[in-house]
Amino acid sequence: AAAVTTLDSTNRKIVTVIDTSGNIIISSGNYEQIMRFDEYGYAIFKSNKNSLHGLLDHEGKVVVPARYHHIKSFVNGYA
């Protein structure tokens, strides 16, 4: 998957995640940034609302709400 950032007609940032076929997995103005998905299927995101970080699963569902100032990538199942 890859994250693509565009601007809408009001210059609001829209982060879209696409798969290798170009299908949209996630498209939302709620994220300032989405990092790459790890081997566990999670991606760290930064919220547009509060600039805090959380985790998304490979389907784009929030599994950890944006309430942390920083999250590191998982290593051996731990962040």
Image (tube, rainbow, N blue to C red):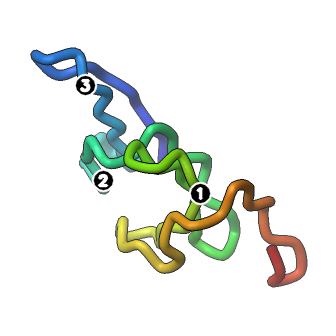
Label 3 and label 2: CA atoms lie apart by: 16 Å
Q: Quadrant of the C terminus?
A: bottom right
Amino acid residing under circle 3 = Arg
Amino acid residing under circle 2 = Ile
> What is the crowding at mark 2: few (fewer than 14 residues within 10 Å), some, or many (at least 20)?
some
Residue 12 in sight in this render: yes
Q: Name the foreground residue: 51 vs 30.
A: 51
> Disc 1 designates what residue?
53
> Disc 2 designates what residue?
26
Amino acid residing under circle 1 = His
- Of the residues under marks 3 and 2, which one precedes in the sequence? 3
- Of the residues under marks 2 and 1, which one precedes in the sequence? 2
Q: Position of residue 30 (x, y in %)?
A: 32, 48
Q: Name the foreground residue: 43 vs 2.
A: 43
Closer mark to the observer between disc 2 and disc 1: 1
Residue 20 in sight in this render: no
Taking the spot 45% from the left edge, 68% from the top edge, the residue there is: 58
Secondary structure under the numbered disc 2 in the rendered image: strand
> Disc 3 designates what residue?
12
Mark 1 and 3 residues: CB-CB less than 8 Å, in contact?
Answer: no
Q: Is residue 20 above or below residue 7?
A: below
Q: Position of residue 37 (x, y in %)?
A: 59, 58
- Of the residues under marks 1 and 3, which one precedes in the sequence? 3
Figure label count: 3
